Amino acid sequence: MVALLTAFLLCVGVVTASVFQRADTNVTPDAFVANSFDYVVVGGGTAGLAIAARLAKGTHFKVGVIEAGLYYPNEPKINIPGLFGSIVGDPQFDWLHMTTPQPGLANGVQLLPRAKVLGGTSAMNTMVWNRATTKEYDVWEVLGNPSWNWLNLLNFFKKEEAVTPAPPTIPADYQYTYNPLFHGTNGPVQVSYPKWSSTIIPVAYKTLNGMGILSDLDPSDGTNIGVDSLQNSVNIKNSTRSYAAPAYYAPCGCSNLVVLTNAQATKINLTPKADHNGNFAATGVTFSSLNKTYTVTATKEVIVSGGTYNTPQILELSGIGDKNIVTKAGVQSIIDLPGVGRSLQDHLQLILRPMELVNGYITRDIVTDPTQAAAYLEEYNLYKTGPYSSSQVSVAYVPLSTFVNKTTQDSLLKGLDAELAATSSTVAPADKLTYAIQREWLDENDVSALEILIFPSFYSTDPSVTAKPNASYITIGLGGQHPFSRGTTHINSSDGLAQPVIDPQYYSFQYDKKMMIEAVKYGIKIGSEEPLKSAIAVNPYDATWTDSFIEEFVTNFTSSEFHPVGTSALLPRSKGGVVSPELVVYGTSNIRVVDASIMPNHISTHLSATVYAIAEKAAQLVLADAH
């Protein structure tokens, strides 16, 4: 998919898509450090820009943001929804994080895309906009964090978004439905439904309905089990991606918000001694820009929004983390906080073989021909319509009992219980808590274990599988939602510009792999059920797809869905937590973490809407403390 989009861009040339650009991204490092900031935000990504804008707007506080990437307000590969994925793997835009070799994936090394641009990964993702279930958010409060629950977070979900109803021209069988009571209309992130959609989508929905998966009329109302056409973070007025930079930063118009790009934070500076409560205070941040080192002061707080991989990195470089890891890396240990960089959880994804459709269905494959692509691109430029105006990913979220029978479910859970018992004496406290919760959910039917993704196009991670010219396809993807496998991300040197060492330990729990094997069997079955069966011209699944072949397929072609969480967990310190309910790093008085790394357990959703909500709630917490 990435290679296909890159090749397409070379064919059709450059396209312009303008958004308002703020001039103060051109501030020099010397001018930046000359400011006296109340708050310094490390990372101008999804959460970082959101909280920075909220702290600056309508206040007297001076807010500075340090961002390693650049601002690309006119970049078509970011702005045009139909070009989603085209900056993945491009060193100009991508951090290019890599895993260590993964034994569970045949010792393969995985690319872990994270956007190195102003706006962060909200500038890179597929623009999917949805939420998890009430249970998955309520459990944060149960784990020891007052007010971190569904009802409280719903206020911030609504505050962050401005939802536009579906175009009246879209037929009802595309399921562009939602409940306005659960959505906002005046927030900065523009949310809409695709203007363009593939004709195979209603057929896929009817097939899943026939298999017992009912339609979910609003997957963001606290219940997400079922089939749904998801909303997208797309500005319907100009058909451009709505992400943190144009949504929060550009409209702010705040002279008290200063963003420095092309600058990488390397250390949070702490007072030499703890206060009477035993807490150290941040005094500022050291960063590198244009091969020089600078230090900027923060009189109130340092807010770390580096993301699940980079937030633990900056904490450890500052002497905050497991003292053994920090010391071994050549950094002086200041606050021994073993939870930093642990409990890494990520959704694993498996893309099944594309199924060729009979003639007559319109899919995204229409843009693979350069001549047609140029015509559709012209349509986009002139009218903001057509396949480039949208990023459609349709999904179904289902519990374990939907895709395995009772005998198989009992066998899977028996094996899982044995694995949990075998690791109970060595597992980290934070993981022990979340394992117990996840295990309960598997016995219930209102929390999803699996995401079924419906791609109306040819999509393959196997380079040996290629598309036919002028053919149309449907591809089924599978995503495990609550992995028991836990990994780590840590520094291994004091070099602030070095990449962190990321070991997700994919499939270290056999249950995760066995569940995915069963999911593959179910995914294959979808193509053999009506009415989708009659729409398929060439089904790649035959007698060679034995249990052993499927297991080999899972091992060789599983990849990340790019939803990492958990490495700075919102939990009590005694349970392995890194931040308090106020998101303050334990052992400090004025360092907060605001990003996906605080999530103590994984959730059955794509992450951007939840990350924005975390930032919105964090801004309220910070402002409450400031007055």
Image (tube, rainbow, N blue to C red):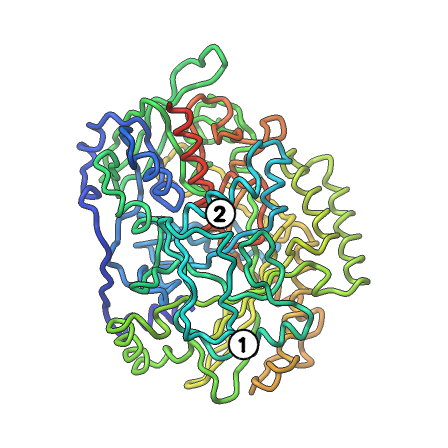
Where residue 495 sits, quadrant-wise, is top left
Q: Is residue 494 left or right of residue 77?
A: right
Q: Which residue is at a point 51% across and 38% down the rendered structure image?
A: 598
Indicate the secondary structure of the residue bearing disc 2.
Answer: helix
Location of residue 71 in the rendering, given as x and y in whole percent from the top left corner: 26, 49
Give, as a three-letter code, the residue at label 2: Thr
What residue is pinned by disc 2? 610
Give, as a three-letter code, the residue at label 1: Pro
Where residue 17 sits, quadrant-wise, is bottom left
Mark 2 or 1, nearer chain start = 1
Q: Is residue 188 left or right of residue 378?
A: right
Location of residue 344 in the rendering, given as x and y in whole percent from the top left corner: 55, 43
What residue is pinned by disc 1? 202
Location of residue 492 in the rendering, given as x and y in whole percent from the top left corner: 46, 36
Location of residue 379 in the rendering, given as x and y in whole percent from the top left corner: 28, 76
Q: Is residue 66 visible?
A: yes
Q: Which residue is at a point 46% across and 55% down the rendered structure image?
A: 111
Label drawn at residue 21 = none
519 over 425 or under it: above or below: below
